[in-house]
Amino acid sequence: MTSTLARDPQTPDRLFGLTGLLADDELIVRETVRNLLARDVRPRLQQWYASGDIPVRELSTAFGDVGLLGMHLDGYGCPGMSATAYGLACHELEAADSGIRSLVSVQGSLAMFAIHRFGSEEQKQQWLPPMASGEVIGCFGLTEPDYGSNPGGMLTRATRDGADWVLDGTKMWITNGSVADVAVVWAQTTDAPSGIRGFLVPTSTPGFSAPKISSKLSLRASITSELVLDGVRVPETALLPEAAGLSGPLSCLTEARFGIIFGALGAARDCLETTIAYVRDRDMNGRPLAAYQITQTKLADMALAYGKGMLLALHLGRLKDAGALRPEQVSLGKLDATREALGIARQCRTLLGANGITLEYPVMRHANNLESVLTYEGTAEVHQLILGQQLTGYAAFR
Ligand code: FAD
């Protein structure tokens, strides 16, 4: 009989001793973000998700105030925190909602990183401080309707006309496109300097429009848009001078994928914590659902997948902070974290029964979001191909 008596449960984080692996400043970041979200974001998430809209400007200034935008970049108003601290912030943000983490990732790791890494001194001075404060919102336009996993085939063109560049083309699935003040747009050009080049396009430029994509069943607490560039004329100073070829945008994606590793596991943690609380409370034939073996084997397997993912994430974070992280290692983490997190979310949903399909609980919201997270920033299959190439020496992309 004593075996059925409840003991104090441990969270998955405690089971793995994860907190003990974090430095004091990393713990402070985790607590700061957790508290901000508990106060200003979590109570409103259901409403944002149901309506398919979020107050991006309000959130970006709130996030800018606590140094979350471009937090692992140095100078120009950016906090210069460690990569691991940034990862932990992403973990907390996505434990709330993947759309909220996407807002911070796109601003800091895609748009701001592109300017920080490839911009001129003038571009950095002009754009980075107001982007770090959240006053200016950026987006990152790489994907096109027919070129997602293979962005090198992009059709968007940049043509020189006197001292200006003229941009024509369409980008698709662009986070924050409709609310951005500046778009980092990647385009092909045959004019010097030729190849794939990046441009900083103020969204008020004539010929630029960004219709919102409304028919999403995933990442509903995030704005996703098409970018239409119809003879958009920008000066020579809009070109990112240090980005040459596809390696430019791909290095930005590597930055953002790093945050996704920690982030996706944040969504998994929220599903697990919600589900453990639920099954301890849910009566089944006079006993809590938590006291049944099938429930426990599911939870044990999920906690293992989560904890191993977090250990990998922290390992990759330490490698990045030591300047030793390679892109294929980021693929390892992105593939593992997104695949496992989605599996955990779906399995947690089964334990919540019919309640699991509602917005009252975060589990199906996370599961739906993770479908996008599995696909963007390199699909799971593309990361498998990257790893396959590393393991065999053969590229199987074509
Ligand atoms: P496809 O490339 O058409 O892939 C379809 C299927 O084919 C997938 O299963 C894929 O794995 C598989 N496949 C592809 N290549 C191969 C191959 N060589 N071998 C075998 N199988 C293959 N993009 C941006 O530029 N900026 C953003 O801010 C942005 N935000 C996004 C937000 C959301 C919510 C979503 C859903 C997407 C966003 N994207 C953004 C686009 C995202 O990066 C692309 O969706 C992604 O790269 C996949 O491209 P695709 O959708 O065209 O799928």
Image: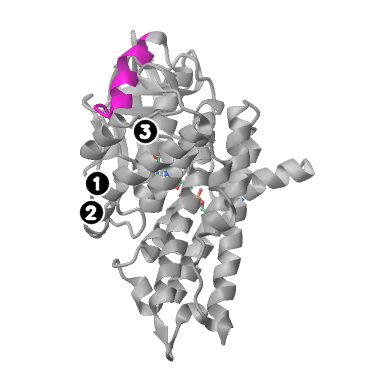
74 inside magenta stretch: no
Relative image position of residue 31 (x, y in whole percent): 39, 42
Label pair 1/2, CB-CB below 8 angstroms? yes
Relative image position of residue 200 (x, y in whole percent): 35, 22
Label pair 3/1, CB-CB below 8 angstroms? no
What amino acid does circle 3 point to?
Answer: Leu
Classify mark 2: helix, strand or loop. Answer: helix
Q: Is residue 262 something that shows in the picture?
A: yes
Relative image position of residue 305 (x, y in whole percent): 60, 59
* 3 or 1: tag closer to the N-terminus: 1
Q: Is residue 139 left or right of residue 385?
A: left
Q: Nearer the viewer, residue 212 or 293?
A: 293
Relative image position of residue 388 (x, y in whole percent): 71, 47
127 inside magenta stretch: yes
What amino acid does circle 2 point to?
Answer: Arg
Which residue: 32% across, 32% down?
A: 66
Please give the range of residues in magenta: 122-137
State which quarter of the image contains the N terminus. bottom right
Which residue ends up furthest to the bottom in the rendered image?
Answer: 285
Q: Which residue is mark 3?
A: 68
Does residue 266 lie above or below 242 as drawn?
Answer: below
Does residue 219 lie above or below 165 as drawn?
Answer: below
* 3 or 2: tag closer to the N-terminus: 2
Q: Which residue is mark 1?
A: 40
Q: Nearer the viewer, residue 299 or 386?
A: 299
Q: Is residue 398 something that shows in the picture?
A: no
CA gap between label 3 and label 2 equals 20 Å
Which residue: 54% across, 41% down?
A: 150
CA gap between label 1 and label 2 equals 7 Å
Q: Which residue is mark 2?
A: 44
CA gap between label 3 and label 1 equals 15 Å
